[in-house]
């Protein structure tokens, strides 16, 4: 084939025009290609695959592999006839690989080659080769790179598509015919030279990493390799590609069975998974074996497949909690105390389940499962607010009706962080929330205990000073005596005594110790340390005041 043409432009130096898809060969490229072409010329049979299995389908069907090798043999016999090689490499008939073989041998006779073609492949990458004749680039490259364990398979790609199996490693290229029976040396070299570091135990099992979540590769020749999913995700170079690209066709599922032992963190050891989950995991593995999933993404997709089949549970990233372990889920969730309280209410209010994806979008589920792509309480609240917001407002802040609807709508259409939103609402509703800590509804208590309870709650919400007037204007009778006891408890008796009748002061004075105990017990409630002392103190006050009615049932 004629070399690149030279064009001379008036007034300029001579310029050399190079065809698109070519480049000037570096010294190292020329040296490598020269060495490989010399081997093809001197030892052409050494680059052909060794046949180790049945190649004929019988029933009068053609044996494409033997036909190809027969045509190549004709080219080899004519390898010193340059004229014949040039005709064969440009011929439109005959075997395609034999045509490329002739082009390579023709190039081998050339003294030098400054320009080389560039081969680009989405999986194999790029490399340089000498283009001669009308042979296909993949065939030319595969033959010229016959020392490369991956590139040399490109020459036999069409035959692989026809049903023949090729296995390549450092020492040999073998065609096992129509059956995918990988040589043992190919299997062991593939594992030992892969990006993973394997160790072999006493039982002959190859191990890479140690974790409960792993994959087990059972080769058809009996070899077993166990690979930790965490270990698999660490490597920048793909393990599955390193194995698959040394065989053609690269269908790993034909030479091994792969079992996915994936369970999220926290999954009980003895808890079985259903068949649907196993099938879902197997589907992901098949996509991985077909090189459709990168190694780093395999664990994530297995986790997603596992979670899609769950019927219950709370899942935070890769951690699973049982539905009755809500506290464990909340402890692992990132968020303020008030956000976690809202999440607790949200989980109880859900009718069914929800999956919150990485974008923060909610996908509602029929099963009682909560799936979180991240560990943010804000993400869950934002995603589920439209469905559970009113429940949160009612249970946390006693907000209902139009007021609750307005607040709900504002937050639904706002980008305000839930921590700040809930905190601000909490400050506005603090007295309401505080009242909810007390074990009794004031109105349900008998008089004058109801008045004592009301005084205590107002003192905590608005300050003791606000209760002095309330105590003074209580009216007459036993309520007035309770008011006097109250001002005595807080040291206001000297300035307030003239407002009370002597008989009221005498009766209320007897109640002061019991009322003081009730006030002290209320401090314990405010500090979230329980209400038992308050209940006992209220019972004592009932006895001291001679109240006949029993205390109502607790509203805890």
Image (spheres, rainbow, N blue to C red):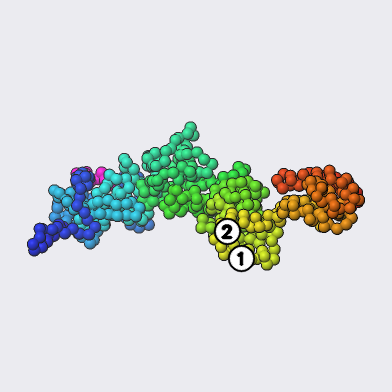
Majority secondary structure in the magenta region: helix
Q: Is 250 covered by the magenta stretch?
A: no
Q: What residue did someone put label 1 on?
A: 409
Q: Which of 64 and 89 is in front in this view?
A: 89
The circle drawn on residue 476 is: none
Label 2: which secondary element? helix
- Residue, x 8% and y 62% (percent of image)? 11
Work out how far the residue at label 2 is from the one at label 1, CA to CA, in angstroms: 13 Å
Label 1: which secondary element? helix
Q: Residues within 10 Å of mark 2 (few under 14, many from 20)?
A: many
Q: Residues within 10 Å of mark 1 (few under 14, many from 20)?
A: some
| Percent coordinates x, y for residue 136 in the rendering | 26, 57
* Labels 2 & 1 near each other (Cβ < 8 A): no
Viewer-side label of 2, 1: 1
The circle drawn on residue 382 is: 2
- Residue, x 24% and y 45% (percent of image)? 45
Q: In the shown orientation, is residue 233 left or right of residue 11? A: right
Give the magenta-colored segment's residue range.
39-48
């Amino acid at each position: 084939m004629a070399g690149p043409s030279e064009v001379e432009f008036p007034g300029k130096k001579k310029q050399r025009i190079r065809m698109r898809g070519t480049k000037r060969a570096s010294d190292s490229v020329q040296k490598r290609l020269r060495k490989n072409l010399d081997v093809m010329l001197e030892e052409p049979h050494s680059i052909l695959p060794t046949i180790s299995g049945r190649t004929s389908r019988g029933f009068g069907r053609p044996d494409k592999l033997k036909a190809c090798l027969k045509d190549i043999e004709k080219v080899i016999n004519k390898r010193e006839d340059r004229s014949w090689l040039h005709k064969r490499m440009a011929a439109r008939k005959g075997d395609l690989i034999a045509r490329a073989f002739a082009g390579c041998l023709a190039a081998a006779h050339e003294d030098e080659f400054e320009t080389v073609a560039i081969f680009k492949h989405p999986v194999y990458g790029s490399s340089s080769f000498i283009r001669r004749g009308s042979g296909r680039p993949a065939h030319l490259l595969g033959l010229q790179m016959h020392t490369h364990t991956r590139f040399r398979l490109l020459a036999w790609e069409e035959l692989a598509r026809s049903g023949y199996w090729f296995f390549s490693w450092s020492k040999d290229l073998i065609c096992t015919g129509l059956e995918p029976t990988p040589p043992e040396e190919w299997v062991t070299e593939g594992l030992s030279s892969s990006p993973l570091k394997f160790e072999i135990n006493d039982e002959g099992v190859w191990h890479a990493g140690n974790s409960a979540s792993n994959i087990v590769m059972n080769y058809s020749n009996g070899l077993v390799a166990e690979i930790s999913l965490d270990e698999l995700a660490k490597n920048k170079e793909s393990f599955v590609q390193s194995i698959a690209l040394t065989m053609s066709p690269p269908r790993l599922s034909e030479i091994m069975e792969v079992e996915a032992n994936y369970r999220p963190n926290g999954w009980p050891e003895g808890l079985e998974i259903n068949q649907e989950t196993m099938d879902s995991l197997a589907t992901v593995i098949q996509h991985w074996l077909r090189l459709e999933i990168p190694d780093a993404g395999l664990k994530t997709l297995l986790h997603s497949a596992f979670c899609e089949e769950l019927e219950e549970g709370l899942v935070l990233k890769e951690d699973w909690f049982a539905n009755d372990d809500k506290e464990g889920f909340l402890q692992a969730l990132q968020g303020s105390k008030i956000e976690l309280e809202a999440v607790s209410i949200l989980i109880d209010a859900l009718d069914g389940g929800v999956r919150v994806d990485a974008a923060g979008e909610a996908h509602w589920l029929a099963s009682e499962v909560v799936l979180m792509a991240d560990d943010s309480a804000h993400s869950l609240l934002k995603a589920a607010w439209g469905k559970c917001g009113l429940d949160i407002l009612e249970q946390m802040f006693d907000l209902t009706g139009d007021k609750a609807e307005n607040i709900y709508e504002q937050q639904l259409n706002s980008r305000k962080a839930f921590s700040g939103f809930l905190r601000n609402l909490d400050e506005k509703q603090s007295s309401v929330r505080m009242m909810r800590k007390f074990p009794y509804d004031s109105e349900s208590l008998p008089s004058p205990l109801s008045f004592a309870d009301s005084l205590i709650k107002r003192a905590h919400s608005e300050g003791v000073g606000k209760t002095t007037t309330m105590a003074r204007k209580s009216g007459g009778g036993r309520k007035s005596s309770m008011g006097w006891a109250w001002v005595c408890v807080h040291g206001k008796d000297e300035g307030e005594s003239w407002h009370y009748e002597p008989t009221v002061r005498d009766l209320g004075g007897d109640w002061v110790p019991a009322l003081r105990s009730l006030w002290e017990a209320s401090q314990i409630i405010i500090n979230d340390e329980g209400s038992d002392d308050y209940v006992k103190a209220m019972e004592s006050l009932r006895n001291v005041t001679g109240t006949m009615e029993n205390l109502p049932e607790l509203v805890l």
